[in-house]
Amino acid sequence: MLTVVVVVVVLSSLLTPTIEAADALARKAVIARDVVYVSTPQAVVDKMLEMAEIKPGDVVYDLGCGDGRAVVTAAKRYGVKAVGVDIDPARVKDSIDNVRSNKVEHLVSIQQKDIFTLDFHEATVVFLYLLPALNTRLMPQLSKLKPGSRIVSHDFDMGDAKPSQIVILTTDNEPGVRRDWGKNEHILYKWVVPWETEPLTSPSKSKTGSGQ
Ligand SMILES: C[S@@+](CC[C@H](N)C(=O)[O-])C[C@H]1O[C@@H](n2cnc3c(N)ncnc32)[C@H](O)[C@@H]1O
């Protein structure tokens, strides 16, 4: 009887950390499901990089990097260091595959992390394609970036932060990209740290290839 009790006690103490770890993972999975994975069409990635006015020495972060297309494009086109971060292991694998097939391992690193506990103070350019509430939740971290750092967000604004530029871009259908709303119209917001905090004004419109 005593042996049984000892075994049960030992087993439960061994299992406790495992249960805690499983809880932590489940919490992260819930966070990941808050934002369904939808990739940014390549034409929109290209426009966002242009809006970010990337220069040598910049460090580009994509918070929730999906298949890594933004960080891979930043490295290939501008030769800058880039970091993609995603909480979902499947997206991290896609990103690593993308980095390898484009041979930019020397410039791009991919991390599996929760962006809300991530230290990204080295970033000078940040890409976002999350949700308005998540952008707002990131504001304390984003506001600590070096002055002059650029934040570019696909489709969603960021609380009371006044964008320095808003572009509306219409793209052609991209095979494999699911977009069930907005008729392929993409709103892109840019802020420069430190941003102004005034109400949003109505966006200026532009189309793909219009040169804006
Ligand atoms: C709408 S997708 C955007 C993907 C990519 N940035 C793009 O534009 O193609 C949002 C991504 O954020 C990731 N994500 C959601 N919550 C996250 C979190 N707390 N930490 C890290 N990544 C997260 C999701 O797994 C998903 O890949």
Image: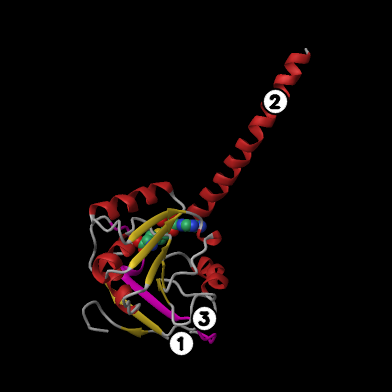
Mark 2 or 3, closer to the camera: 2
Cα separation, mark 2 vs mark 3, equals 53 Å
Q: Position of residue 113 (x, y in %)?
A: 48, 54
Q: Is residue 202 magenta?
A: no
Which residue position is annotated with label 2? 10
Which residue position is annotated with label 1? 201
Report which quarter residue 53 is drawn in: bottom left
Cα separation, mark 1 vs mark 3, equals 11 Å
Answer with mark 1 or mark 2, whichever residue precedes in sequence. Answer: 2
Numbered circle sitting on residue 161: 3
Q: Looking at the image, which is closer to me, 74 or 28?
A: 74
Q: Amino acid at mark 1?
A: Thr
Q: Given contact means CB atoms under 8 Å apart, are the residues at marks 1 and 2 in contact? A: no
Q: Quadrant of the N terminus?
A: top right
Look at 47% across and 75% down and name the residue there: 157
Cα separation, mark 1 vs mark 2, equals 63 Å
Query: In this rendering, does residue 12 appear at all?
Result: yes
Look at 63% across and 41% down and name the residue there: 20
Q: Is residue 187 above or below residue 27?
A: below
Q: Looking at the image, which is closer to me, 142 or 57?
A: 57
Look at the image and give the residue range highlighted in magenta: 177-199
Which quarter of the frame holds ligand 1? bottom left
